[in-house]
Amino acid sequence: MLRLILAFVAAGVLSPSAWASTRYTVSDKGLFAPTGRSVEFSDRFGWVSYEAKFKFGIDVNARSLSPDSTLDLTVRRTDGTSWSYRCKARDPREMRANINSIYGRGTLVVVECRVRADKFASAVGLDGDMVGSPTLVFSAWLRDGKVETGSQKGFYFLNSAQIGSSVMAQYATENDDPSELAVIFSTEQDIPAGEGMSASRYYYQPTARFVP
């Protein structure tokens, strides 16, 4: 068996880096920053706060996540209940990543997770065919072997045939663009002490979409 593995490595089928994926874990929690809409998503659907945990490994050369990478999200609501979802990288149709090494800054990992509509529906009290295509965005920086949360975190929603007749229509993006977030996560320590949320403040930085 060992000879077979070495033969694959030598042939380039499996690179050595694919077998040496360092594991990282980053946790994040906070509130929802305003986007400037007349009715913010969190206000309409009673979202109060969020908690996220991103466990991942990466192959920088292949610019891909290890198959066992996961992103867990819990949203707490005004009625005291919560909604949770787990994204798994083993299905590339569900989770994909943009991994870029930026000189002098580190490696930026931006992931998108396509949340199942029927599961997301319970988070907003709507039918599954009325929520469009919900996409969870999360980012992390790797610097000198350490990991910290990035600034781009939240949800965007793709248009669908049904979403136009739903209250979700005002939160949909027409451009399938992760920088057009309808829900923006603001990390607890990023919120200035004694200051309220303001739509004039920037709580995230737009990031280029996935490079093929």
Image (cartoon, rainbow, N blue to C red):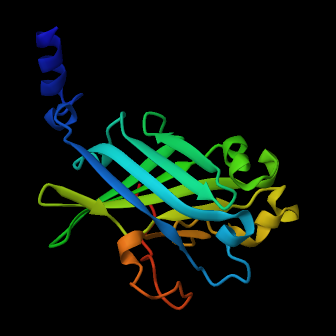
The quadrant holding residue 19 is top left
Horizontal arrangement in the rendering, residue 110 relative to residue 46 (left or right): left
Q: Quadrant of the C terminus?
A: bottom left
Q: Does residue 199 sit above or below 55 in this rendering?
A: below
Residue lying at the far top in this picture: please name it: 1
Residue 122 is situated, as x and y percent measured from the top left of the image, at 72, 47
Residue 88 is situated, as x and y percent measured from the top left of the image, at 46, 38
Residue 15 is situated, as x and y percent measured from the top left of the image, at 18, 33
Q: Quadrant of the N terminus?
A: top left
Q: Does residue 176 sit above or below 117 in this rendering?
A: below
Q: Residue at x 69, y 64 (%)?
A: 46
Horizontal arrangement in the rendering, residue 57 relative to residue 29 (left or right): left
**Can residue 173 be seen from the camera position used here?**
no
Residue lying at the far bottom in this picture: please name it: 200
Residue nearest the viewer, comparing 1 with 162: 162
Q: Does residue 17 sit above or below 167 in this rendering?
A: above
Q: How many marks?
A: 0
Q: Residue at x 35, y 73 (%)?
A: 189
Q: Residue at x 53, y 41 (%)?
A: 93
Q: Residue at x 17, y 71 (%)?
A: 103
Residue lying at the far front in this picture: please name it: 80
Horizontal arrangement in the rendering, residue 194 relative to residue 169 (left or right): left
Horizontal arrangement in the rendering, residue 186 relative to residue 66 (left or right): right
Residue 178 is situated, as x and y percent measured from the top left of the image, at 52, 65
The quadrant holding residue 49 is bottom right
**Can residue 137 be seen from the camera position used here?**
yes
